[in-house]
Image (tube, rainbow, N blue to C red):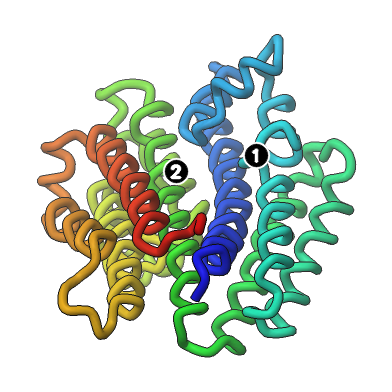
Amino acid sequence: MLGKTANGLYWMYRSLERAENTARLIETGQRIALTRLELGESEWRSVLQSAGTLDQFDATHEELTKDAAIDWLLRDRANPSSVLSSIETARQNARLVRTALTHEVWEATNAAYMSARDMLARKVVERDLPNVLGSMRRRSSLVRGMTHGTMLRNDIYDFARLGTFIERADNTARILDVKYYVLLPSASAVGSSLDNVQWESILRSVSARGGFRMEYGAGAGTRDIAHFLILDRRMPRSLAFCVRKLGDNLGYLNKGQMRPGPAQLKAQHIERTYLSHDIDAVFDYGLHEFIQKVLKLLAELSAQIETDFRFYE
């Protein structure tokens, strides 16, 4: 496959996943902010920081408010990671690799773009926000469903999956960081009713509440939740699940080679060194420090994938 085609597929699916997860991040900020009303709109600086767009926001805005932060994350074209920008980027890449996609995948991607364009043509009022965020998630899920249901399991599919899972791992880590590092008031709050409500919000934001309740019941604590979202390989948005899938798809792409490629080795290193221990080891390391380390390694893995498969040649 040409590097340009691989690049287009990778970034098409990465952008779709980013749109969905930015919507989830906004919802997380909304839910967690409700538990800390006394701090008001300053909560959203933390969300922007975890989204990696705080510096860009500060450069283009005189004041940070809740409305301005949500609009920036949702529909501002000056923010390349906004939901609208991400869906537009996904569609642009889909057009570039149109012949590699099935008709159903293209139609679902184009419909996602048209829906986002219409729903985000103007500022979204707060009462409409849950419906808009839900629609963005459903549209992204429809593309993913069409991909699973109509695409051949070949190198085209593998590059699509690489984009999906590296972005999903990145965003799960960022959503965890919003909760534990930035928004938790103090060490004394760990295990409190406030702490539990915030962890509940995290589970909801990654569609993990039902699965978690089935596995752990209603009396589980914060360490169980952290384990579920970081180390449980059955949970499709956990860090361990995503990194395992990255290793699998890189293995398929390297099939027939004498030895694993550099990107495959990096994925294996992340899994064995950071995602094969118990949750107590993660907390001993420091949850924020652990998340930041994994984010750094995921960025390095993404760069290695681009190099290994000559994305720009």
In front here: 10 or 213?
10
Q: In this view of the protein, can residue 13 be seen by the observer? A: no
Query: Which callout, 2 or 1, points at the residue further toward the start of the chain?
Result: 1
Task: From the top left corner, tell me how far across and down residue 247 is, in percent.
Answer: 28, 69
As drawn, is 278 to the left or to the right of 223? left
As drawn, is 87 to the left or to the right of 202? right
Residue located at (83% from left, 46% from top):
120
Residue located at (63% from left, 52% from top):
19
Label 1, on which residue? Answer: 80
Pick out the residue farthest to the top.
Answer: 62
As drawn, is 113 to the left or to the right of 266? right
Task: From the top left corner, tell me how far across and down residue 65 is, in percent.
Answer: 68, 19
Label 2, on which residue? Answer: 175
**Is 238 drawn above or below residue 43 in the view shown?**
below
In front here: 302 or 218?
302
Where is residue 233, by image quadrant?
bottom left
Where is residue 91, by image quadrant?
bottom right
- The alpha-carbon separation of the residues under discs 2 and 1 comes to 19 Å
**Is 194 drawn above or below residue 150 in the view shown?**
above
